[in-house]
Amino acid sequence: MSLKKYCNVGCCVTGSGMRNIELKARLAERSVAESVCQSLEASYQGAIHQIDTYFQTSEGRLKLREASPGETELVYYERPDVAGPKGCDYQLETVSPSIKEMLRRALGVVTVVDKVRQLYLWQNVRIHVDEVSGLGSFIEFEAVLGGAYDEADGFEKLRFLIEAFQIDDDAHEEFSYLELMRSEQGDDVTNRRGGVPISSERERSV
């Protein structure tokens, strides 16, 4: 499988709706995660510099992803703000980078997330070891559904990977990089599930 095919959010299909089972978690030791990837014989696809520009939307999340190496893609996705493995429904289109200014003027920019992603492929799961500017290190699993790979398979594989990488429950991240970056920047980010700011919810959980 080529790096170009998997360097961005989506699979090789564009335009139609797709679904993943996903997990994001904070990462304490990048070297340990990379060692686990090697022990699983996950296929290393290389490092990708990704700049995600998020735009205002009334529902879901909309971002323009500029990837090097890779293409520029417009991605819309809907995913619940809950910790642990969860479903994510998304659509994407390969676009010209010049569309960014049009989107900025029409919708307004919420924030920009700049990261370097180490990409591994394990069966139908994309493993991301991310270094995010201003936020730190994270690991993501994305089980791509379709064909023989259904939701049950996706959840089972993520449970296996959580165990293999020894990811504690308190490291699971319920929010996207969008909300995490806005919170880091001091914005009053609201938990979409209950109207509670991220900072207030975390203070109660400490």
Image: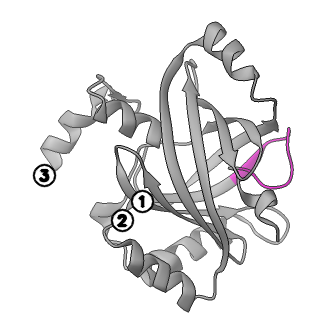
Kindly indicate whether the residue at mark 2 contacts the one at mark 1 (C-beta within 8 angstroms).
Answer: yes
Task: Find residue 79 and report its horizontal and vertical position in percent.
Answer: 56, 42
Q: What stretch is highlighted in magenta?
A: 10-19
Three-letter code for the amino acid on which mark 3 is drawn: Val
Relative horizontal placement of residue 56, taking residue 176 as reference (left or right): right
Query: What's the distance in space between the residues labelled 2 and 3, CA to CA?
Result: 18 Å
Please state which of residues 203 and 32 is positioned toward the viewer in this rendering: 32
For the point 65% across and 38% down, which residue is it? Answer: 65
Which residue is labeled 2 in the image?
Answer: 27
> What quarter of the picture does the N terminus occupy?
bottom right
Q: Magenta includes 18?
A: yes
Task: Find residue 28 and report its horizontal and vertical position in percent.
Answer: 30, 68
Which residue is labeled 3 in the image?
Answer: 206
Please state which of residues 66 and 40 is positioned toward the viewer in this rendering: 66
Badge 2 density bin: few <14, some 14–19, many ≥20, Cα 10 Å: many
Three-letter code for the amino acid on which mark 1 is drawn: Phe
Q: What element carries label 2?
A: loop
